[in-house]
Image: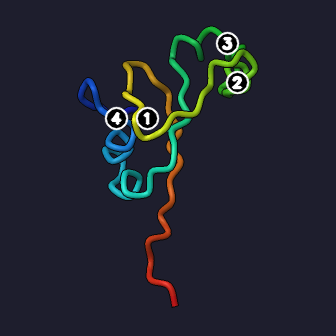
């Protein structure tokens, strides 16, 4: 699935477009450019190929999103009350 974001959007704000909890609990973004995925995936719907070729990377809160980024957002949503 894809979401539309404005040019210059940082990773936490892009995560917030999907769900506000993702922005609030943002940890990191695992990113691969679509062109790199297309080149290295080897016909599989897997990130194994891009990872083997060093095209899958981890980015932090200051990462500016780019057109065509494939992203897995890592977040912590354990904001509930503790007993």
Q: How far across and how far down the image is residue 42, in percent?
A: 72, 14
Q: Which residue is mark 2?
A: 51
Q: In the picture shown, does residue 30 fall above or below 36? A: below
Q: Which residue is mark 4?
A: 10
Q: Residue at x 33, y 55 (%)?
A: 20
Element marked by disc 2: helix
Q: Residue at x 72, y 15 (%)?
A: 53
Comes first in the chain, label 4 or label 3: 4
How far is the residue under mark 1 from the one under mark 3?
20 Å
Determine contact: label 2, label 1, CB under 8 Å. no
Q: Residue furthest left?
A: 6
Disc on res. 34: none
Q: Which residue is mark 3?
A: 40
How far is the residue under mark 2 from the one under mark 3?
9 Å
The crowding category of the residue bearing disc 4, from other C-alpha atoms within 10 Å (few below 14, some 14 to 19, many at least 20), is some
Q: How many marks?
A: 4
Determine contact: label 1, label 4, CB under 8 Å. no
**Which of labels 1 and 3 is toward the front?**
3
Disc on res. 1: 1
Determine contact: label 2, label 3, CB under 8 Å. no
Q: Residue furthest front?
A: 62
């Amino acid at each position: 699935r894809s979401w539309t974001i404005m040019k210059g959007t940082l990773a936490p704000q892009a995560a917030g477009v999907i769900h506000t909890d993702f922005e609030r609990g943002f940890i990191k973004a695992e990113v691969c450019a679509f062109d790199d995925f297309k080149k290295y995936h080897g016909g599989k719907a897997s990130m194994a190929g891009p990872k083997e070729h060093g095209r899958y990377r981890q980015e932090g809160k200051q990462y500016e999103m780019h057109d065509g980024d494939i992203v897995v957002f890592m977040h912590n949503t354990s904001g509930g009350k503790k007993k």
